[in-house]
Amino acid sequence: MHHVVLKRLGQAVFTMWIILTVLFFLFRLGLPDPTVALVSEGLSPEDRARIAARFGLDRGIFAQYFIYLRNALSGELGRSFHYNAPVAGIVGDRFLNTMALMLPAILISYLVGPLLGVLLAWKRGSRFEVGGISSALILRSAPMFWTGMLAVMVFGIWFGWFPTSGMRTFPYEAAHFFDKIFTLDFLHHLILPATVIGLYYLGLPMLIMRNTMLEVLGENFIEFCQARGMSPARIMYAHAARNALLPVITQLAITIGLAVGGQVVVEVVFSWPGLGLEMFNAVRTSDYPLAQASFMLMAAIVLMLNLIVDLIYSWLDPRVTYTAAR
Amino acid sequence: MIRRIAALAVALLLVTPAFVFAGGQAEPEGEPVQELTIYTTTESYDPIRYEAAFMIADAWQELGFQINVSPMEFSSLLQLFYDEQNFDATILGWSGRVDRLDPQHFLGTLHGEQTDLGANNPGGYENPEYDELFVAQSREFDPERRRQIVQQMQAIAADDNPVDVLFYRDEVVGYNNTKFTDFVVMAGESLYNEWTPLEVTPLTDDRMLTIGTPQEPDTINPLDSTSVWGWKFMRMYYDKLVRLSPDIEPIPYAAEEIVDVDDTTIDVVVRSGMTFHDGEAVTAEDVKFTYEYFIDNDFAYFRPFLSDIESIEVVGGDTVRFNLAEPVASFITVTLSQIPILPQHIWADIENPADLAPDEIPTVGSGPFRFDQYDRGEYKRLLTYEDHFDADRIEIDGIDYIIYADSEGVFTGLLTGEIDMTAWRMEPGQIEIAEDEEDITVVSVGDFGYYHMTYNLRRSPFDDRLVRQALSYAVDRDTIIDVLLQGLGEPGYSVVAPINAFWHNPDITRYTYDLDRSRELLEEAGYTWDSEGRIYAPN
């Protein structure tokens, strides 16, 4: 078992290196020179060269690459070109803000979604199933900038029930991050964007759960359960659902990983000061260090969660063993 | 058979215009003009410049050119234009920044010394006469004489037409008329100028003016900020020797008096009794220190304004004397009005100010407001500085700035009453909604920035002045403004906009839409057309 964990860890590190390399070259070759935006501020070519030198942009691309790898290893993420400030601080704040929005939205949709999915599978063929599947598909296909704007218009402007932007009312005093989010005011700001995201995410776990449930329900042990006279609810939730949960868990891990980047459109519509908004701006201003760090963070979290999920599998489903996998 | 004749007739009909168009000319001479590309922004970045490019391309095609429109992501477009100069014609713009009200910057974009890669004249226009006048105006201290030179330069530029000035876009902003009144409107700055917070009168108990903006300072380090959004914030809590009045006249502010002893010696008497927000007095030494500090740190953004200062000395206690290497026409309007006065007792010990971490950046100034709070991406707050010499006229307690992700967010803030005014222009769709709202007053101001199409004069056919003129006569400015800008703009013809009335020259060549005139000019330049209407360049 230890051996397997080490092996999986090794694979994760290797994958991370590939991602770091791709990120580095992607941004350098794909984005325009970051100092170009300064021209329209009237800076002369010499002055721009000076600024480029300050950020090490005058060195060869491979020299830059090795410095970048070395820094990534030591956790040094560099300095944002645009803000001229350490990236770690910027990304860190934004990351927490994004998580404060995404985690509640995702958790709720992954709690409610699978439960509904079980019901859909159980009531197969009924009107409830048709209605459930169609609404899941509609929610999943409706673009979030649109649902977001609708929510702003109806609940923000017409009814005036909820604030339409940001994560708190100004001015405020907050000593640290938890001061910011454990307030009623924050909750008030959270409801609209989190609902928009939650509704969007709801469909996937619901449908995955339904499909796997249908497979599981066809298996022999369900008949045995019925033969033993168990109640439908007990068979559904205690026996069938547990066996159908694996793909949902995998999906949850991936969703949380990708959620690090936030939902750019929702963050824009609600002016949520999250990482998605920052990434969007970073690409627009060719701010490599900032964009890189954001994507790095996202990749690292996806990899880590995948690793954890792999290991959780054997606990959830004892049939999955790693020694036999060879 | 009948069908065949009918088909032939139709074919003839289709061909006839081409014959008529060729106007009985002989066989075309020379080579057909190669396909030309107009580079522009993407539709999502700016639908106006995007659509304008296609309209211009259509007209040029009517003249017989083959035109390709290539929309590009904005910073790639800037790179192609400025860094590579690899274009035929490019549509871009210059923003109207207050220090550009002095004609120096915009006239400089046609200066022959700025044609290098990365510099401000990517089209490569060079005219010795123009260049000579450019130097002359920048050394001319007498405004009246300088104006004559500046106007002469505009006439030359309009005839040579290296850059087609397409239009000046109106800035349309809005404010909530139930909360505050007495807003100040300024050319190029609209409501978001340095006078509005000094002048507004509250109509309710809410004495904090709340401004909504989609832009954010890049940094609030005065030795490092290279964006207008940094400066528009900092100028409220730092003071400046001169401020430009709402009518764009330089008025002594932290200076009591400015005396030009001679062309290269300028004395500034520092106002007495001023204090920084930490209580220390503002002295002539602080002013001298600030200018020297900016020069020593060689901060690129301000270098052009400071490069002619030879030395600075304090004379008689409260007077700072600037000794210039050469007369600088824009010294008072730009140099004295752009540099914030820094407290020497705080900055003197900072060796590399550009490397300051965000939370180490000092925020002590001597301006009419003092810095209170800044949360990146969310919020900024300034409070009224009661000890400021101008504090008596300030009727508010301070300014709240709410930062939104985009202009849609700002607009929603205005509708819900979260903010009192917008710092950035509204989109056409928003303007219509705002005009229907009783609580919102919509304000429209002309801009002195401009949108332009720059021809690459290094390439044929743009190296020919007559062709450039012909191409500009084919630009339908009125339709661009009526349709694309929904009437909110002025047709362009000079790099110095009409709203910049003192410097602007109204009596120069204007290229009003006239395709016949275009064809005449092309013929005059020796261009010919083949039977299909395709244009040929002379040998």
Image: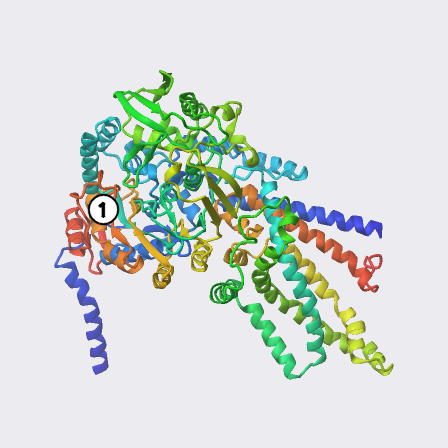
Q: Nearer the viewer, residue B29 or B142?
A: B142
| Chain that bears disc 1 | B
User: What residue appears at the point 27 percent right and 49 percent down from the top-left corner?
Assistant: B166
Q: Is residue A135 above or below residue B88?
A: below
Residue sticking out furthest to the top: B316
**Disc 1 marks which residue?**
B493
From the viewer's perspective, is A233 left or right of A152? Answer: right
Q: Nearer the viewer, residue B355 or B454?
A: B355
Residue B119 locus on image (x, y percent): 36, 35
Residue sticking out furthest to the left: B24
Residue B384 can be seen, yes or no: yes
Q: Amino acid at mark 1?
A: Tyr
Residue A102 locus on image (x, y percent): 62, 57
Residue B262 locus on image (x, y percent): 25, 19
Q: Quadrant of residue A61?
A: top right
From the viewer's perspective, is A245 left or right of A99? Answer: right
Residue B194 locus on image (x, y percent): 37, 41
